[in-house]
Structure formats: C-alpha cells, structure tokens
Image (cartoon, rainbow, N blue to C red):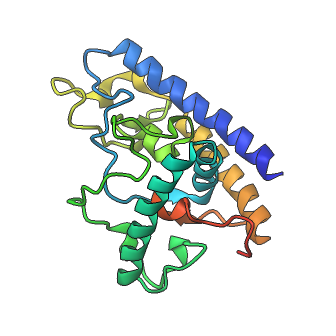
Amino acid sequence: MIQDILAEYRQLLGGIDRWFAACIEQSADQIACRPGCSACCRGLFEISLLDAALLQSDFSELAEPVKKQVLVKARLRVSALQQRWPEFQPPYILNRLPDDEWQQMPEEDLTPCPLLGADGNCLVYQARPLTCRLHGLPNIDCSGESFSDDCCTLNFVDSNPLHRTELRYPFRDAFAREFDLLGLFARQLTGQHQLELDTFIPSGLLIDFSADF
C-alpha cells in the first residue's frame, strides 16, 4: 500500500515538474532556475514524511560510498539539532516538538543540503521534495488564488511574474491531492489520519519507516 501511495505521489510531482519546465520554456530569458543551480539548496526547511520516504527510496539506489558520505553529513546535522532540541528523537517528527521554534529557521544558515553533490546537482533529483520543485516561482492557481507570492531574486528581475497568467497552475487541486496522499500515508504509518507529519531532509534520511510511529 505504501508503495502505491509513493507511486501516485511521484505522478503528482511529475505534474509539478512539467509545469515548471513549461514555465522555463515560455520565459527562458527570465528564469535562472535549472538543474545544477544550488543557490536555494542551503539551510533547513520542513518536508513531509511522504517526501522523506520518497527520498529514501531513491537514496537507497546510490552507490555505497556516496550513501556513507551523505549519512555522515545527515547524522552530524541531526546531532547538532538535538543539542538545540533534546526532544528531537526518532522518528524525527517536527510537529511533536514542544514548540514551533522550528518553523522560524535562521535564514542565514548556508549549510548545504547533505544530498547536494560536489557538482551542484541533487543526488536524488527525481525524488526531491515538493518544496524543492516549487521554489523559485510564485505558486498562483489558475483561478488567480495565491498560495505563495515568493519568487527567487534571480528570476524575473525586470518584470512581475505575478501578472503572468502563463505561469499559473491548478495548485489548489494539486495540494488537495497531496493532502489526500499524506492522510493515506499517515494512516499506514500511525493508524491515524494526520496531515502534519514533517521533518527535515537530514533527519528524513535517518527515519526508520519500519519502526513503530
């Protein structure tokens, strides 16, 4: 069942990728985002446990020496976090911490993602989290509803992307389906319907999904 959920999630992410690729095709001279640009692959940001499971699926296919190097970085990062939050223990679910301090991570944190290769490319690009795929362009629904007005400062330096209807996408439907899949995934893990099971990329690589949640 979990593999079926992950397969459907991959399809959903594929739709986001096609949207992003179409945006680049239509506005290539205005968008700096490309595979290999790692300007945003720094610091800590939350991902869902569904994203973490997908990361682990592709991470398991990497060469052993590469996996060992990544896991060393991930464990060091998690160990540092545990100095700050002693309660941050397996299965590393952020929503179970006693406060919401993790939601305001320092913007000046430039620590590279442990999955960032030496060449600036993501080692598991096809399994990268949803937030990585969305970053760089505003997330404006086809209806005009804004889910995020943020845009990478390297993009659209001479124009306002919020006014460009060709950059829109049915985000409301996509996010609704994401929540559906998150709920199904959470029920498989915990026996309960939950929509907030978040972690970080380094801790996500260390989660034992076969353990008791």
Across the whole image, how many numbered discs are drawn on residues? 0
Q: Residue at x 56, y 43 (%)?
A: 63
Rendered-image quadrant of the C terminus: bottom right
Q: Is residue 113 above or below residue 102?
A: above
- Judged left or right of residue 85, residue 153 is left
Q: Quadrant of residue 126?
A: top right
Query: Residue 58, image x and y in percent?
Result: 61, 43
- Judged left or right of residue 130, residue 11 is right
Q: Quadrant of residue 38?
A: top left
Q: Is residue 108 above or below residue 41?
A: below
- Tell which residue pokes out farthest to the front in this image: 65
Q: Quadrant of residue 79?
A: bottom left
Q: Is residue 191 above or below residue 61?
A: below
The one of 53 and 63 positioned closer to us in this rendering = 63
Query: Residue 36, image x and y in percent?
Result: 35, 31
Query: Residue 104, image x and y in percent?
Result: 32, 68
Q: Residue at x 49, y 79 (%)?
A: 88
- Tell which residue pokes out farthest to the right in this image: 1
Q: Residue at x 73, y 57 (%)?
A: 185
Q: Is residue 161 above or below residue 194?
A: above
Query: Residue 161, image x and y in percent?
Result: 29, 28
Q: Is residue 145 visible?
A: no
- Judged left or right of residue 75, residue 160 is left
Q: Is residue 86 visible?
A: yes
The one of 61 and 97 positioned closer to us in this rendering = 61
